[in-house]
Image: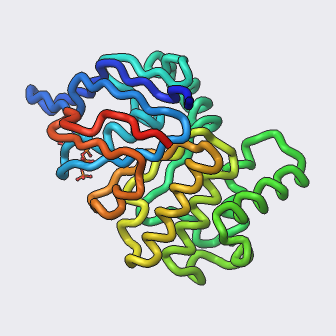
Amino acid sequence: MNKTLISCQGISKVYFKGKQEITPLNELDLEIIQGEFLALMGPSGSGKTTLLNILAGIDSPTHGKLFFKEQDISQLKRRQLTNFRAQNMAYIFQLYHLIPVLTAYENVELPLLTHRLSAKQRHDRVCRALELANIADRADHYPKQLSGGQEQRVAIARALVTDPPLIVADEPTGDLDQESAQAILKLLKSLCAELNKTVVMVTHDPKAAAYADRTLFLEKGVLIKGDHHVAH
Ligand SMILES: Nc1ncnc2c1ncn2[C@@H]1O[C@H](COP(=O)(O)OP(=O)(O)OP(=O)(O)O)[C@@H](O)[C@H]1O
């Protein structure tokens, strides 16, 4: 039986635009278990990115509690949240966000430069991450020499290199052809099933969501269905 990784208890996000109140998330309750592949769907403006950023510790809820491995991270100060992120999460983007002047290897190595590791430990970690993402044969290539699917594999290796329990992905296949998208989705699924990673993925594509263990639907900041777990 897998443990709860994230527990959201009544979380809301409120912005003020002049006197107007905008509530992208409204008293949301959610449990996410370790090793789960979770898809997040909903119309534009329904709060998906807001929720993803809060789950990843990039943003904080205005109200409510957010427990990550039983620690309430909604109470952390900015610097503590930065440390939390470095140890516990990685982000994958629709457009990969690789550094163009660095090779695939150097892009993957980047998050480790703030970690205390010997050169050998760093090298071993980068090689393992490139292998896990099935892109080791392109280690010396620059992003512009790679296809979109290969760039996303490098981004996934970069996400894996610090070994975080949580990977959040904002439309990771939104810019890929169907074949490359399927390969990336299978890779994300295998990270959950084989490495016990938790992946939370925002998508507009029901075919992409079908790879997940569970799909949540947001509408106007409220979960409208899908909050039940599927056993692995
Ligand atoms: N910093 C902000 N200040 C004010 N309003 C914001 C801010 N960030 C988001 N919002 C508003 O919150 C709502 C939800 O935005 P969010 O980006 O989470 O939606 P989304 O479901 O990810 O949309 P999309 O699918 O278009 O990316 C929107 O109405 C948006 O305008």
Q: Position of residue 26 (x, y in %)?
A: 21, 26
Q: Could you say where residue 113 lies in the image, as x and y percent from the top left?
A: 74, 49
Question: 5 and 142: which one is in front?
Answer: 5
* View extreme (bottom): residue: 145
Relative to the observer, which residue lies in front, 157 or 232?
Answer: 232
Marks counted in the figure total: 0
Q: Quadrant of the N terminus?
A: top right
Q: Tell which residue pokes out farthest to the left in this image.
A: 19
State the image quarter where residue 196 is shown: top right
Residue pictured at 31% horizontal, 24% vertical:
29
Residue 3, percent from left and from top: 55, 27
Q: Is residue 150 left or right of residue 163?
A: left
In the displayed structure, would residue 185 be above or below residue 47? Answer: below
Residue shown at 84% from the left, 58% from the top: 123
Q: Where in the figure is residue 156, as x and y percent of width and height?
A: 58, 59
Residue at x-position 69% and y-position 55%: 110
Residue at image coords 22%, 37% = 225
Q: How is the image coloured?
A: rainbow
37 displayed left or right of 226: right
Q: In this view of the protein, which residue sits in the foreground, 69 or 12?
A: 69
- Ligand 1 falls in quadrant: top left
